Image: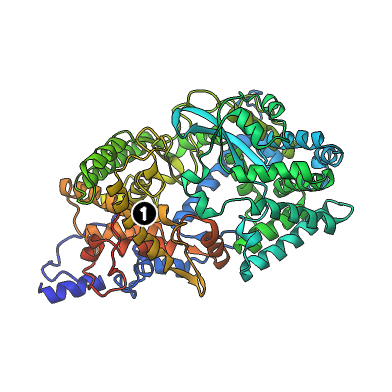
Amino acid sequence: MNARLAVACVLAFACANPTKTATEKTEPPAKGLELSDMDRKANPCDDFYEFANGSWRAHNPIPASMQRWSRRWQAGESNKEKLRLILEELSARTDWPKGSIEAQVRDFNAACMDEEKVDALGLSPLQPMLAELDALQTPADVQRAIRMLEDLNLSAPFGVGPQPDAHEPSRTILEIGAGGLGLPDRDYYLKPEPRFAEAREKYRAHLRRMFELASFADPQKTADTVYAFESRLATASLDNVALRNPAATDHPTSFAQLRTLTPHFDWTLFFEDGRIPEADLNVDQPEFMRAFDRELAQTDVAQWRMFLEWKLLDASAPWLSKPFVDEWFGFNQKFLSGVSQMKPRGVRCAELADRLLGEALGKKYVERYFPPAAKARVQELVHNELAAMKDIVEHLDWMGPETKAKALHKIATFNPKVGYPDKWRDYSSVKVKRDTLLENIAAAQRFEVRFEHGQMGKPTDRALWGMTPPTSDAYYNPLLNEIVFPAGILQPPAFDLEASDAVNYGAIGVVIGHEISHGFDDQGAQYDAEGRLSNWWTKEDLARFQERTSCVVDQFEGYFIEPGIHHNGKLVLGESIGDLAGARVAYLAFEKAQAAHPWKPRDGFTPEQEFFIAWGQFRGDEIRPETQRLMIQGDPHPIARFRVIGPLSNLTEFQRAFSCPAQSNMVRQNRCDVW
């Protein structure tokens, strides 16, 4: 085949091999690569997002109950359907031993699924706590109510939780975090742009309607009071970009200093009630806590009462009777996210059980859907990609030997977790009944709060997981230098035991590389191998690193979702570094696998092309415009389209795989190269 024809075939993917005889057999498509999802009319060098998954998106509109849709999101919803079926099977049996986890999960689901009873009860399950809040008369009463809501895991207006000490991660300390806002973040209260002004108007109307449903004496006045209260809290809160800087939320504080910071709050009683040791802690936003203290000193009890009642009502609304559920859904899902239809009750109950009894339900999920062979194969992929990251660092020409040695040490100390915990959580102390949904939720929340409080002041338990096993997601924790991949994401289309290396490395492999790379993004690079918030860079190397990351900031600042609304490059910097470096790490590991076990081209695609197509299909979400606006404002992840074209347009490996001319849209002239 002559060179000109070869280039044309690479771009069109429709040429027959003229040397093939009629009797030759072709191998079946590699499992996991969905050829029918591709838009063959699109040029991969112009718009790879459309080329990789355009046909699937065109023929699979976003379901009315979803914010976004792709095979990846479809798989996540399939996980929930599997959980629903497990719950149904457990519920079908009446002979589970009393107090067994099977009986607990069965009864929890039975109470959740009894929608008729929930509707008949109306607001009555919440009335005792609302009455208690309505009876507040003194500042001491307000503080008692704050402690009561903290026991239900509600931030009113601050929250506390366990966190490895950023300066000595081997011990776990108390972290005090800002909260209390009903809108997504501070900018919704403060910025003048029309989309924020509209959200404020809708939110105030939502507050009024919720108080009307709850039969408050003066719904409008209550709504205005709550909105003004939250607005003052918003003014004292950090914005989303500032929150990404670990130094901005690193404020080691002694118990004595905490009392000085907020002298009007009785921390001794708070710690006693929560069974928390009076030890060193961290306050993530001291200015917010000062504002909280001013509210305690200056705001009358009536305003506090309304605010606290709202926090309880808002958190409970999705599980009250239909009028409350509909109103909650109308604002939080329909308006903010563009979702027009609620998920079926069975799916929502499965989501709730996963959130509150996640490891109990997750154990059943793993037994059915994550075989040992899958865990072993993913562990192999992780091992290979850590080795690839090591190779990349060793061959960097911009990093000096001193910094490089510390980077390599950090790679060597990564702790990968795959599938599920080694030790399962014991929920036997949670009191669950078949006919009291809201009480069951409260019992599970109190159990979680007690579990978290029990970690504070103790050696860090590195065996704990931050996600449940059925979760279709992954994460990196810089304080523990760990990468975690729950069984829920280790399913097709992300991972398939029968898929080719190209497909597995291109899908879950890039996710693995992404999480590894978080250890070296703008945030992770501030933590050393032991998880300490500590600079391990020389001055010169850090300057070179920051210069390279600024290229990524500039790239994503240029990505618009609609006229006038574009990505904040600093907000999405960490995730964008993760995608760029993750693709490179996974590709290097794939090349080594390909060299050891060559995979022949199929269906007109080389293995290298399959790798990139797998990533384009895995990340190929269609996203509602309303959800995109939410993401642009507060999500550190870019829009799916830009997660596909953004990193790949920087990679010479992609350009080479598809023979893209230098002036193609998918070939950036100012390429970003961080790792």
Provide residue 408's location: percent of width, then percent of height.
Answer: 26, 38
The crowding category of the residue bearing disc 1, from other C-alpha atoms within 10 Å (few below 14, some 14 to 19, many at least 20), is many
| Residue nearer the viewer, 252 or 405 | 252
Question: Which residue is under mark 1?
Answer: 577
Provide residue 206's location: percent of width, then percent of height.
Answer: 74, 59
Above or below, comparing residue 334 to residue 272 in the picture: below
Colour mapping used in the image: rainbow
In the displayed structure, does residue 402 sit left or right of residue 100? left
Quadrant of the rendered image containing residue 239: bottom right
Query: Looking at the image, can residue 667 be seen?
Result: no
- Taking the spot 44% from the left edge, 32% from the top edge, the residue there is 167
Above or below, comparing residue 102 to residue 330 in the picture: above
| Residue nearer the viewer, 670 or 246 | 246
Q: Number of labelled discs?
A: 1
Q: Secondary structure at mark 1?
A: helix
- Taking the spot 73% from the left edge, 57% from the top edge, the residue there is 326
| Residue nearer the viewer, 299 or 130 | 299
**From the image, which quarter does the N terminus lie in?**
bottom left
In the displayed structure, does residue 88 sit left or right of residue 414? right
In the displayed structure, does residue 395 sit left or right of residue 48? left
Provide residue 39's location: percent of width, then percent of height.
Answer: 36, 71
Quadrant of the rendered image containing residue 603: bottom left
Mark 1 residue type: Ile
